[in-house]
Amino acid sequence: MRRTRLVISLILGIALSVGLLVVIRMNQSAVAASVDASITLPSEADGGAPDSQQVTNTAYIAVRFADNDVAVRAITFTKPISALRALELSGFAFTTADFGWGLFLCSIEDVGDSGDACDNDDRYWATYYWDGGSWAGRMVGITEAMITQTGHLEAFSWSDPGWDPVDPPPASPLTAAWQALVWLQAQQEPDGGYGTPGSTAEVLMALGANRMAADSAARANTMSRGAGLAGSDAAGAGKLGVALTAHDICWPRQAPMPLDYYSPTTGAFDVDAAPHAWAMLGTAALSETVPPSATQYLMSLQQPSGGWEWGQGWGVDTNSTALAIQALVAAGEPLTSTSIVSALTYLQLAQNADGGFPYDPTSAWGTESDTNSTAYVVQALLAAGQDPLTVPWTINDTHPMGYLLAMQLEDGSFEWQPGLGPNQAATQQVIPALLHRPFPVRIVALDVCSGAYLPLVSRGE
């Protein structure tokens, strides 16, 4: 086994050797880019801004931590830099070990062994670069791999057990997500929010999908208005749960939790499917068990077409169906479940020739594709183990992700439909889909806040 591991590592350009292990912990100054939501581009130039006489290049660094968990950052440089230097500039916290033949990447953020042993057993970090059409594995170490031109995309991907490398998602959606985040953050209002409490919650979801923390103003706004959002209905509580867990922010003391809306008698968080699904997602995000009767209630609302209605009598739509699929998967429903398979069939029939999805494929008010609906469907496909880039979701040489990319404007924002201009709701909702991230973004038990938002005690203590 040891020999196999050594041979594979040499092939991948990961230098290993017998000798003294020296672990170098790197807590870069640029880590603020991943701690604060304010996007800046870390520069290679010493002392801050690049020399005005030099051309400033922009490159992207992507890290695939697991399936459906990828984050991207942008950096700037004025002269060729190594993959190691690029990773330093990205702000991702990482550790390396020197085995004598070069640096070995031990961990990035919370993935991998950051201890002195650098013992990842049968896992390792593979390094890639985008060659214009696909990911190409690096055949040299991170100190020798060079980044020389603007637009370059370097990626680091955590392997599967057994030393199998895993390609990250395609480059275009990742860079599009970053550009959308840059635009989105410029929409922040003086009070720290992004419009309504529900809209601010969705921005927190988008930031969390890219492993970026909300800034202090956005966090304070969410905490001050979170009780109102959660108190509005089960959907609001569910949205708040998905948003706060994405950042491990404590739960507002006065805010009802999703489970507070649950009725053991009926099995419902809400009589309507979409709010019920949001409450299920929020419950799962908060690391609480979704009651089996709640899962059964959601499946009982499924219509003969395989889809769900947002509210009873409203008619089946793709958005409610996408949320229902994600809620069922989050609750532990098998992907082979008749309910999920039927829902996927409904979505397949709803897909338009442009690769996108409408809100309602039978609506008398229009059946054109839109960004929000397509983004929700992409998240549902990913939750259900489907690849939105392949058959059966490829149609007329395009696919849902292709439709989304075509909806991005030059300033990084997204349109809801072609020709309608920048749309904040579309932009904030598309980012998790571009990052291949279904809901919930993160699963974590939250503390209840004391005062503004200081942790006091865990729920149940």
Image: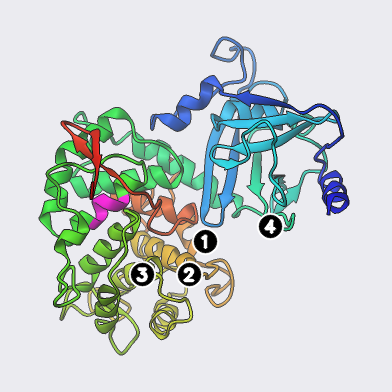
Secondary structure state at the residue bearing disc 2:
loop
Give the residue pinned by disc 4: 161
Q: Residue at x 19, y 55 (%)?
A: 236
Q: Which amino acid does label 2 sit on?
A: Gly
Along the line of sight, which residue is nearer the eye, 54 or 272?
272
Q: Which amino acid does label 4 sit on?
A: Pro
Q: Which of marks 2 and 1 is nearer the N terminus?
A: 2
Closer to viewer: mark 1 or mark 4: 4
**Are discs 2 and 1 less than 8 Å apart at CB?**
yes
Q: How crowded is mark 3: few (under 14 residues within 10 Å), some or many (20 or more)?
A: many
Along the line of sight, which residue is nearer the eye, 418 or 101?
101
Marks 2/1: CA distance? 7 Å
Q: Which residue is drawn at 75% across and 50% down?
A: 136
Q: Which amino acid does label 3 sit on?
A: Ala
Closer to viewer: mark 3 or mark 1: 3
Secondary structure state at the residue bearing disc 1:
helix
Q: What stretch is highlighted in magenta?
A: 238-242
Marks 1/4: CA distance? 31 Å
The magenta stretch spans residue 218: no
Along the line of sight, which residue is nearer the eye, 289 or 226?
289
Q: Earlier in the sequence, mark 3 or mark 1?
A: 3
Give the residue pinned by disc 2: 355
Q: Which residue is drawn at 42% across and 36% down?
A: 182
Give the residue pinned by disc 1: 402
Closer to viewer: mark 4 or mark 2: 4
Marks 2/3: CA distance? 16 Å
Q: How crowded is mark 2: few (under 14 residues within 10 Å), some or many (20 or more)?
A: many
Q: Earlier in the sequence, mark 4 or mark 3?
A: 4
